Amino acid sequence: MGERMSNPYSSFCEDFYVNMRLGSQLNLPHQRETLLHFFERIQKEFPTMTRFRKSDSGEFNLEEDRSRQDHRWVSLESRRLSAGHVNAASVEESLRLHRLLLQLAPFHLGISPVEIDYLDVLFGFDLSFSGNHDEVVAESLLTDSPLNCLTEETGAKAVDVQPSVTVALSEDCRLQARIDIVTRTNSYQVRTGDYSDDVISVYLILRRYWGDRPRGSMEDLLQEMTDRAIQLCDRHILPKVVRPISSAIASRS
């Protein structure tokens, strides 16, 4: 499994990351003592996660120095626990943090399988491009699609092309996969030609809605979903989405 779980994606993007999100139907605890014990336990396992802050929206964050190429983060919102590892040495390495959180959540945050709404595994690819993101996505992914017809109009310029597709992978529709393409070009940039050096993001998101209590542990489910995400990336996301966008960016450089 070690070789199969290695990170083969970094050569195709500026940043590659594996995120996890655990959604609850009930508010998660935000008492001072509970939070401190929870984050201190994370720091015990990952001592370099030293940056703690609370946002204006009430979100609590613990993270490593984001200026590092390889860094981790954890976020606790009112009804969601999220975490990510950017540019990990391998996919397996990124799961170390996610497994720890799933182990800690029932004991430190009191999260019960009864209240869980969903578990997400997200594979993210960031591709830097100083130009019209929407135009690149339209040309690389929608060239032969009828949905690209409006760009045939004289003087037409793409300003919002962000395809999103969701499919069910199980008969009960509780296991779903979604592709999200996120562009960051705005109309002002298209109008003036003054583009920032921002990223186009490609997300593969596997979501398991609870509905009933799955057999096995959440850590086992995380591993199963990660394995499936790797399969989908190898079969579809990398060759059919990431590489075409990367090639279109390279042709304009």
Image (cartoon, rainbow, N blue to C red):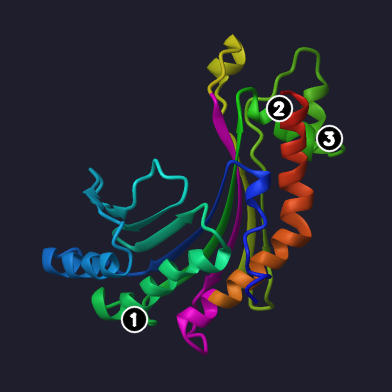
- Total of numbered circles in the picture? 3
Residue 184 appearing in the image: no
Q: Identify the image quadrant of the N terminus.
A: bottom right
Residue reaching furthest to the top = 192
Q: Which residue is mark 3?
A: 143
Residue reaching furthest to the left = 33
Q: Which residue is mark 2?
A: 135
Q: Which residues are magenta?
A: 197-222
Q: Nearer the viewer, residue 136 or 223?
A: 223
Earlier residue among tags 2 and 3 = 2
Earlier residue among tags 2 and 1 = 1
For the residue carrying disc 2, how many other residues have a C-alpha within 10 Å: few (<14), some (14-19), or many (20+)? Answer: many
Given the image, on which type of amino acid does mark 3 rest? Thr
Q: Dot 3 lies on which element?
A: loop
Given the image, on which type of amino acid does mark 2 rest? Glu
Q: Identify the image quadrant of the C terminus.
A: top right
Earlier residue among tags 3 and 1 = 1
The residue depicted at 41 percent of the width and 60 percent of the height is 83
The answer to if 207 sits in the magenta stretch is yes
* Mark 3 vs 1: CB contact within 8 A: no
Q: Which residue is mark 1?
A: 112
